[in-house]
Image (tube, rainbow, N blue to C red):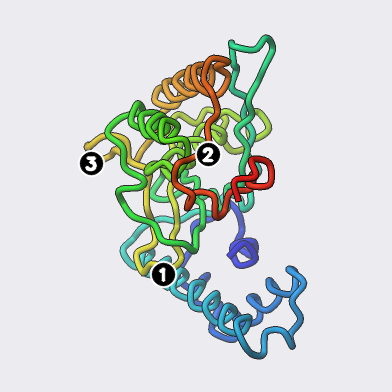
Amino acid sequence: LEDIYGTFTPNVVLVANDFKQFNHDKIKELSIKAFEKNKFTKEDLQSGRNAIACEVVQKYVSDYLNYQIELIGENVEIIPIAQEVKLKHGISVDAVEDSVVYLTGIADSIEKIDGVVNVIDYKTGSVDDKEVMVLDIQELFYNLEITSKKSGGPSSKAKALQLMCYALAFMKDDNLLAYNKDLKLLSSKIASLRKKDPYFDLKIGIDVDSNVIDLDTLNIFEKELSEFLNTHIYNKDLAFTQTEDVKNCEYCPYDMICNRN
């Protein structure tokens, strides 16, 4: 998708033919090139799991482009702004003098959809609406606190937290002034490539326009995040304990340190 969107002129409204030009053969060609960038050879993609994976990627891309065509047919205005945008924003931590925790990430796509700037993260895994919906900012940290008390395991709102961090980092990254200067609101969403209807917007509250995040909301989130880091991560009185559920260890990158397994 990065290669496809890279052919579009930034800040120009897309039309259906921009996507229709990428037929099956063109998508296949781009998919193979993408695999080759990751050290696969054409022979590797001829059979077995690699061939299946390549076919799946092609279907994901084709379905996503068709969805964009449908949106344009419904008079939705799509304007590409940038691809693979690096995000970085520092959060001050009072518990340690002169300490800053940096939020970093890469936004797969920045687009303006019907006049609203969207920070988009592509995912091939499963996504559910409940994972990106919260009643208020505090719910993000409540779920993190519950997770920490259980000594491990993913927060049920991890995807919502990621989208919120991406929104904050994009809005406040001084290196992105070309994109965020004078920006007062945005939307942050996941594009689940395995879904026919791929967009999962971060929603805060129950209002119709709750998928639009304004600067005041991001300022509140930043303050709450700083306080959470102070009271949990940098709290010397809060012990680190092993998870009671060994299933949480299966994909943990720190299992070599704790020697649980």
N-term-proximal mark, 1 vs 2: 1
Residue, disc 2: 166
N-term-proximal mark, 1 vs 3: 1
Q: Quadrant of the N terminus?
A: bottom right
Dot 3: element: loop
The crowding category of the residue bearing disc 3, from other C-alpha atoms within 10 Å (few below 14, some 14 to 19, many at least 20), is few
N-term-proximal mark, 2 vs 3: 2
Q: Does the rendering let one see residue 151? A: yes
User: Percent position (x, y) of residue 103?
Assistant: 60, 33
Callout 3 amino acid: Val
Residue visible at 38% across and 67% down?
A: 195
Q: Is residue 21 left or right of residue 66?
A: right
Residue visible at 28% across and 39% down?
A: 209
Residue, disc 3: 208
User: Percent position (x, y) of residue 39?
Assistant: 77, 72
> Is the Cβ of the residue at disc 2 closer than 8 Å to that at disc 3?
no
